[in-house]
Image (cartoon, helix red, strand yellow):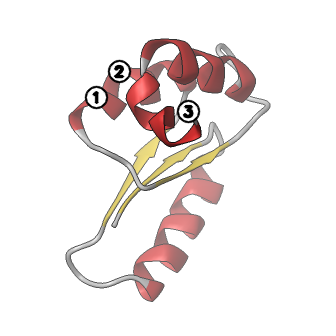
């Protein structure tokens, strides 16, 4: 399973990643992004099964990030069609 965490709170990201990796298997991947811009640039390298997305971040908000995913990466949402 591939999971992304996108949040501008570094301490929260570290804690959540630790909790997730304690629950997941060794070969699962948990990536951290500290902004919506970083996430959108990096999400093309990995097909994420789940994304923890902070809605209120400085710069691009989580709402804007999700909207960009929806418009630019219809692959992620093809199951909705």
Left or right side of 62 for 32: left
Q: How far apart are marks 1 and 2 (CA)?
A: 7 Å
Q: Distance between the residues labelled 3 and 1?
A: 21 Å
Q: Image point 52% across, 23% down: which residue?
A: 69
Count neighbours of disc 3 (C-alpha within 10 A) and say few if under 14, some if 14 to 19, many if 20 or more: few
Identify the residue under disc 2: 41
Q: Image point 58% across, 68% down: which residue?
A: 15
Q: Are marks 2 and 3 in contact (CB under 8 Å)?
A: no
- Name the spot of residue 74 as percent of width and height, x first: 45, 23
55 relative to 22, above or below: above
Disc number lying in front (3 or 1) = 3
- Name the spot of residue 9 as percent of width and height, x first: 66, 44
- Which structural element holds mark 2? helix
- Which structural element holds mark 1? helix
Count neighbours of disc 1 (C-alpha within 10 A) and say few if under 14, some if 14 to 19, many if 20 or more: few
Between discs 2 and 3, the one toward the N terminus: 2
Identify the residue under disc 1: 44
- Quarter that holds the C terminus: top right
Q: How far apart are marks 2 and 3 (CA)?
A: 25 Å
The foreground one among 20 and 71 is 71
- Name the spot of residue 18 as percent of width and height, x first: 48, 74
Identify the residue under disc 3: 81
Between discs 3 and 1, the one toward the N terminus: 1
């Amino acid at each position: 399973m591939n999971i992304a965490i996108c949040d501008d709170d570094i301490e929260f990201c570290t804690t959540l990643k630790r909790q997730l990796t304690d629950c997941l298997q060794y070969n699962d991947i948990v990536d951290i992004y500290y902004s919506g811009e970083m996430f959108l640039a990096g999400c093309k390298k990995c097909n994420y099964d789940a994304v923890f997305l902070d809605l209120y971040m400085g710069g691009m908000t989580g709402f804007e990030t999700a909207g960009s995913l929806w418009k630019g990466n219809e692959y992620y949402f093809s199951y909705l069609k």
